[in-house]
Amino acid sequence: MLRDLVVNNRSCRRFWQQVPVELGTLRELVDLARLSASAGNMQPLRYILSCEPQKNALIFPSLAWARYLGDWPGPAEGERPAAYIIVLEDKEVDHPLHCDHGIAAQSILLGATEKGLGGCIIGAVNKPRLRQALNIPDRYEVLLVLAIGKPKERVQIEELAAGGSIRYWRDAEGVHHVPKRRLDDIILPL
């Protein structure tokens, strides 16, 4: 069911790094994005796929992982993603970008969840560093990086108490807790 995919599609930040994600799998996930909605049907998004350890090692240092977890520098070696999908905008396509990259990222991560994989949308990217590391032409603007792999952590949704904090946290067992506002708190009675 779609609801199960949405509920299970949580931002995963620790992976079984040694479990490979095949290039064909990444292509299948990008195909889901390709078939998704695009503003004006302009289809300005382009993708860089990585499932090779050497290329992944070039990508990882350009990413910031979890603002609410304080000084955590991101997953340790052995817990890093086995793959990445870099979402780019082709600046030569005249279009209203709006939310294409969000739609694409959600489609990709729902597909990954269906395949038993996990992922994380990373917007905190040192774009100049990543551009240089991968020799990305100026024609393409880096929008997001999607980390993909076999999840090593458990993520649990919590109902946000009235006046509570939206900040996610990890408990002593390493379970990642994500507070979500109640449905009645986000639907306005107008």
Image (tube, rainbow, N blue to C red):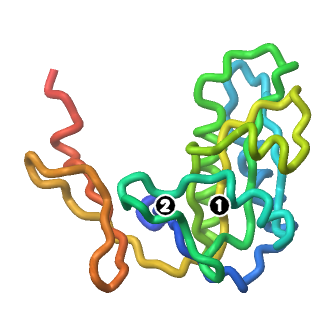
Assess whether mark 1 and mark 2 are in contact (beta carbons under 8 angstroms): no
In primary-sequence order, the first of circles 2 and 1 is: 2
Q: CA distance from mark 2 to mark 1?
A: 9 Å
**Which residue occupies 60% across, 23% down?**
98
- Percent x, y of residue 190: 16, 20
**Which residue occupies 20% across, 59% down?**
159
Viewer-side residue, 12 vs 77: 77
Question: Residue 38, relative to residue 18: is it above or below?
Answer: above
- Under mark 1, the amino acid is Ala
- Under mark 2, the amino acid is Ser
Q: What residue does disc 1 label?
A: 147
Check disc 2: other Cα within 10 Å, few if <14, some if 14-19, many if 20+: some
In the picture, measured across the screen, residue 41 lies left or right of residue 52, that is left
In the picture, measured across the screen, residue 87 lies left or right of residue 67, that is right
Q: Tell me the number on the disc at residue 11.
A: 2
Q: Quadrant of residue 168?
A: bottom left
Check disc 1: other Cα within 10 Å, few if <14, some if 14-19, many if 20+: many
